Amino acid sequence: MSSSSALPLPAETSWSRVSNFWSDFRQSPVAVAALIVVVVVVLMAVLAPFVTPQDPYNQEALDLFDARLEPGEVGSGGYVHWLGTDAAGRDIFSAILYGLRTSLIVGVMAGTLALVLGTTVGLVAAYYGGRIEALIMRVIDLQLSLPAILLALVLVAMLGQGLMQLVAALVAAQYAYFARTTHGAASAERRKDYIEAALSTPLPARHVLFRHLLPNALPPLIVVATVQVANSIALEATLSFLGLGLPITQPSLGSLISNGFQFLLSGRYWISIYPGIALMLTVVAINLVGDQVRNVLNPRRSR
Amino acid sequence: MSDAVLRVKDLQTQFQSRAGALKAVNGVSFEVGRGRILGLVGESGSGKSVTGYSILGLIEPPGRIAGGEVLLNGKDLTRLKGEAIRQVRGAQIAMVFQDPMMTLNPVLKIGTQMIAAVRAHDRVSRKAARARARDALAKVGIPSPEERLDAYPHQLSGGMRQRVAIAIALLHSPAVIIADEPTTALDVSIQGQILAEVRRLADETGTAFVWITHDLAVVSSLADDICVMYAGKVVESGPAAEVIASPRHPYTAGLLASVPAEHEPGTKLPQVPGSTPALANLPPGCAFAPRCAKAGPACTTTPPVQTFEDGRTALCHYPIEPVSCQPHSLTSNTYRSAS
Amino acid sequence: MPAALLDVEHVSKRFVKHPNLGERIAGLLGAGPKAETVRAVTNVSLTVAKGEVVGLVGESGCGKSTLGRMIAGIYTPSDGKILFDRAPVAKSQGRRTQKLTTRVQMIHQDPFASLNPRIRIGDTVAEGPVAHGIVKPREADAYVADLLGRVGLDPGYRRRFPHQFSGGQRQRIAIARALAMKPDLLVLDEPVASLDVSIQAQVLNLFMDLRRDLDLTGIFISHDLGVVRHVSDRVAIMYLGRIVEMAPTSELYASPNHPYTRALFESVPRIGVGRKDFRPIAGEIPSPLHPPSGCHFHPRCPFAGPRCKREAPALTAIAPGRSSACHLNTGGTE
């Protein structure tokens, strides 16, 4: 029995997995650029109070004499409004950073909560099978056949305005994607021998669910999660643009775009365009990062 | 052997990886004569399948053929590119895979696929092509071949599908068929049927076979000659019956000794210790030395190819002396039928 | 004969493929498929004494893996019962099977699929015994180290992941996981079929050592007649869901009785016989969806007569400890 000589392999640490992941990830320069954009956007949003000249939440600090200044003009505060100001005299640059904060908070919160809810629902369906699975998955299918924006609109109309209501509406509109992805991945894993081995040991159900099924169903979920954060941000912007999201006193990127929309045709493009560019950059960058994560995690990629 | 139809000389196939170039096939040479069956034997990672794929030019990046020649009737296939190699493949040399669905398209009828395969190389009418397809199916022992032409692959059993794959390989009467573990996934009784058909085909049609397998018993009952591969190299070659009766390389000997059917039930089996080395991490000199009971001081240097009588070779510093007795006898342990 | 540890009594397993919603609608219109029933195992009885290893041999569709999974408590029988130490191994709970004992453990064919790729092997071995209180969490590490040593692996490897091991080493890990539950009965489903020849011998030797040291009882499922002969005390040959012949290993291999057993032995290629004329069994293995009438083997059997088409032969004793299901033994095939 002593004759089995093991291969001399280095013990694998979680660090070496991370470094492998990173060396695969950086194969795509576009994805690396997108990741840099995401990091910068997040940093600027987090550090907004320290890098902006003005607090757009503070109505007192706003000066109507500064209204609708063009990009590059100097306002009454004595500093340059690099991206101009809006009708209430808000510095667009400051408003964008604060807006990013709100958008990112809404996006990440909605994405995370939808992930937790959807994953649980999908896992339960895949694990128990039979009637439970059929019922859950039919509800999910039904929901996925409706456009998310429609569902969110109805929910916001019912729940009313406010940050928490908005997040709740977004979660309800999006958890189905997670549920379906989890269900698909977990159903495939469910048929594998190691699950059969766990069931025949037998290990307790929660053990099989959370230690065996979940971690193996996770890679596709990470991808969906990234994309859904971007979708949440876009969805929130849409709702706010339609006037159903957050009020202008608590600006998100969507409400900022909406705010400047009426001036777009009178030549004061900057009030809408710059928040729009910020929104687009953020959403596209997150999606590009998500794409590359999917490529790296795909076990069938040729390597 | 001057009448060899396929001659592989010093074939080198490498795969680029993070760890550098992995030499999956590292200087393999052998030849196969008309109507003969060569058993290419090895365990996983020995390079036997990569050798088969290399012969047909089916190596894709990050892999490449880094050297050597594959001479099919004197023509070097490694120099052919694109359309030229495609003209040869399927017509003069064909492949049968472990999974017949690598050859068969699941949404097309067997007949449609076989007719297309005939007309890929020969300008004949659909009717003539269909007749040839039917004959090929009959040749591999498929009952009622006319009806099978109208069947879809999923309507056939695994064994039947593999017969169809062999029939497709035979369509253009190729000089050589490379078969990669074609019966490994099949049941014993079906494997027996196919081995019997292949032996008959080789004898009757003169097609040469390179039969890639891990199963020594299959090679022993089917092949004329044998090449044993280990870590990308041929470690032993020669006529099948003689190699099996009296192996000269310690690895071949270890493999043969560890087959349970050759031992008294319940006794400890002689085992080859350790496991196959990773290509990225080969020991210097002889790759088998760390697992070898006969290893000596010279084994840290590259072993020479030793040539013996009857065209036998072994890649070893200390080859085993031949046993002088009768070919490997099984008298005590044979399964005997009561009939 | 010592008391039976495992009792398989008239067990059958049917898998019914229910048509899905679309097919059911098509069915209402008269075009859809009907519910199809696969008879994977039909009326199988088997007893295994303590300390005995019984080999289950057969080709695909013979039901050997399904029978093994019922014994291991992964499936519940459709009919009949499986008693381990006089208590059922598993019970049906709605659509799911609940296993009732930890004393029967299974080892799968493919060690690349049977180990969770994301769990360190030490945790894989430890989680069963910890969950069932066989070992305290504090002592689990030492317990695992001891088990890994026992199956011939360096205990220092327990923080590694499965992909860092070769096939043979993974199969040792799977064996350690099963042993960790302190089983009395091991169900081994083709445990060496996916391993290289030189590694097969290592794992078979390990199994024989463990069997002797731990007084294990085993069900050894394999299509490889040579492997089964080497490790089993008794062998049951299965064909299309039924046991066709059962005998002590040495007697079965010396003088097989059933025509299928004989044909199977003759179609196996063997080392050292040299180029030989195969006498393969004619015909295909029928689908278990539509098995032939009477004796399932009759369409391929050279001795078949009219009675074989009509009547399924029962497994009857032909000598002490031997039984065979063939009309040739019980008054002929006419």
Image (cartoon, coloured by chain):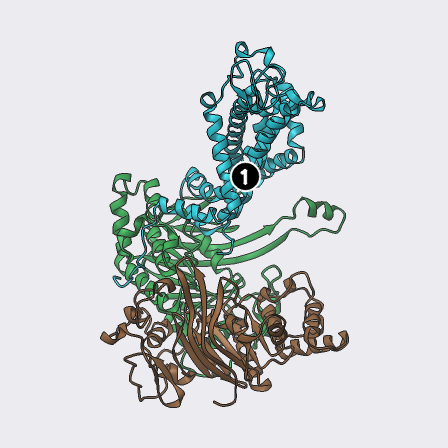
Quadrant hosting residue C255? bottom left
Q: Find chain C in the image and tell me its colour.
A: green
Quadrant hosting residue B311? bottom left
Instruction: Categorize mark 1 by other alpha carbons within 10 Å: few (<14), some (14-19), many (20+).
Output: many
Q: In this rendered view, identify the residue nearer to me: C141 or B121.
A: B121
Label 1: chain letter: A
What's the residue at 41%, 39% (across, down)?
A: A207
Chain coloured brown:
B
Q: In this rendered view, identify the residue nearer to me: A98 or C309.
A: A98
Task: Work out which residue is located at the far top of the displayed protein and give it.
Answer: A60
- Residue A219, compared with residue A244, is above or below; it is below
Q: Which secondary structure lies at badge 1? A: helix
Quadrant hosting residue C281? bottom right
What's the residue at 60%, 31% (across, down)?
A: A277
* Quadrant of the snapshot with the C terminus of chain C: bottom right
Regarding residue A107, the answer to whether it shows in the image is yes
Q: Find chain A in the image and tell me its colour.
A: cyan
- The residue indicated by pointer 1 is A224
The answer to whether B110 appears left or right of C323 in the picture is right
**How far from the left and from the top, in percent, is residue B241?**
41, 84
- Residue A99, compared with residue A136, is above or below; it is above
